[in-house]
Amino acid sequence: MKPSEQTKLLFVKLILLCFMAFTIAAFAEDKDLAKQSQNPISTLISVPFENISSFNNGPNNVYVNTLLIKPVYPLKLTENWNLINRAIVPVIYQGELVEGIGNKTGFGDITYQGFFSPAKSGKFTWGVGGVVSFPTGAERMTTDKWSTGPALIGLTMPGNWVVGALVFNLWSFSGDDDAADVNQFSFQYFVNYNLPKGWYLSMSPTITANWEADSDDRWTVPFGGGFGRVFKIGKQPVNASLKAYYNVVHPDDASNWNISAQITFLFPK
């Protein structure tokens, strides 16, 4: 083999090695950012917008659309503890659920979630805190009650996986005396598997129970999932996902399935 050919072969090998190193580094960066964005109590500032299209609501089987604005702002309290602040602001469109009341658009009740989480938690990440619901919603979109309760979250992130659960219960303690009391349970489990180039598979259904309702109309149990990807729009990292859920158990007049489309703006430190 001529020296010039050896030089060319070495040059090609170097290019391939550089390309492989760049690809691995880019995948590691995308995967790390994806896993951070899938961790509800990470130190990543984010602003998610989740649009939920819900079908077959009420006796007239109408369409309900809910846009959830869910900013997350972590605070470093000490060297050992963080406070993860999460808010949920619903903007709701309701079809004519009952004949004669017409369509309705407005804000729903705002919810705040706060979690104290260890800054260094090892293989298992956890947080403990509370939830407060404020009766800020428009007519027919509010409980008219102030509610609060404890909350707990835990997750682990081995390899390409992010697996965990968030659980809380709300009890009303003040508000309109004529409004129904609130005693609401919520359990959300999430399972994410991260793929190359920022892609991932995901399921994160929220199981709820209204303890004030009759036993036949108490539970909502969805099942399903979808996919998403972390990428950049210009220099701005975003996380976009699309999921669908079928409610295998639900109250008689509640929706039996919904579609969730979410885009989250990420602000890594």
Image: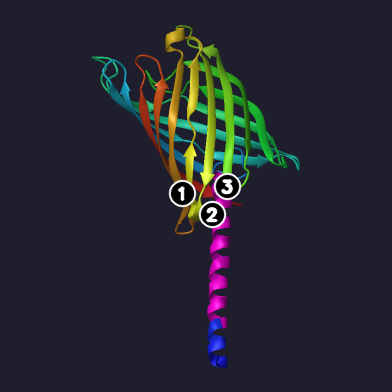
Q: Residue 27 carries which label?
A: none
Q: Mark 2 points at which residue?
A: 30
Residue at the left extreme? 100
Residue at the front extreme? 1
Q: Report the amino acid beneath label 2.
A: Asp
Quick one: quadrant of the N terminus? bottom right
Query: Which badge, 1 or 3, comes first in the chain's sequence?
Result: 3
Q: Report the amino acid beneath label 3.
A: Asn
Q: In which quarter of the image is residue 21?
A: bottom right
Residue at the right extreme? 79
Q: Name the residue under label 3.
A: 160
Instruction: Choose mark 1 or mark 3, whichever is in front.
Output: 3
Q: SS class of the residue under badge 3?
A: loop
Q: Report the amino acid beneath label 1.
A: Arg
Which is the main secondary structure of the residues drawn in magenta?
helix
Q: Which residue is found at the position 55% from the left and 52% from the top?
A: 31
Alpha carbons under labels 2 and 3: distance apart:
11 Å
Q: Which residue is found at the position 54% from the left and 60% from the top?
A: 26
Q: How crowded is mark 2: few (under 14 residues within 10 Å), some or many (20 or more)?
A: many
Alpha carbons under labels 2 and 1: distance apart:
9 Å
Span highlighted in magenta in the image: 10-37
